[in-house]
Image: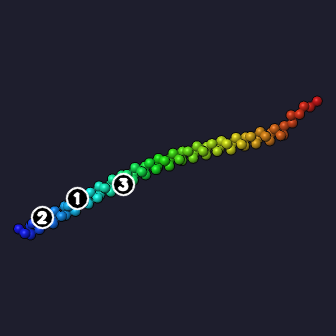
Amino acid sequence: MGAATELMGAATKLMVAATELMGAATKLMGVATELTGAATELIGAATKLMGAATKLMGATTELTGAYKYQNLVTKLRKNIDVSPKF
């Protein structure tokens, strides 16, 4: 009977340890879930920044085109003689 009691006590200790491990695993899963959420938010922010950078690049391209057009118009104006000829 004493051996059976000891075995039951050992089994109870193992069950307590297993329960504690399950609790720790559950906490880790919670932390992992929070980290996943934070990572998702960071990815969203990075995507928005990439979108803004793309818009900025588009605006820069348009400005470059306008600058080239302005230079072309200036060159053409210099080459066209608009003085009256009598």
The location of residue 28, given as percent across then percent down, is 32, 57
Q: Residue furthest right?
A: 86
Residue on which disc 1 sits: 19
> Contact, CB < 8 Å: mark 3 with mark 2?
no
Q: Residue furthest bottom?
A: 3
Mark identifier at residue 8? 2
**In screen coordinates, is 68 left or right of 15?**
right
Q: Residue at x 26, y 58 (%)?
A: 22
Q: Residue furthest left?
A: 1
- Name the amino acid, label 1: Thr
Mark identifier at residue 32? 3
- Within-10-Å neighbours for mark 2: few <14, some 14–19, many 20+: few
**In screen coordinates, is 19 left or right of 35?**
left
Sequence-wise, the earlier of marks 1 and 2 is: 2
Q: Residue at x 76, y 41 (%)?
A: 72
The location of residue 36, given as percent across then percent down, is 39, 52
9 w.r.t. 71: above or below: below
Q: Residue at x 87, y 36 (%)?
A: 81
- Name the amino acid, label 3: Ala
> Contact, CB < 8 Å: mark 3 with mark 1?
no
- Name the amino acid, label 2: Met
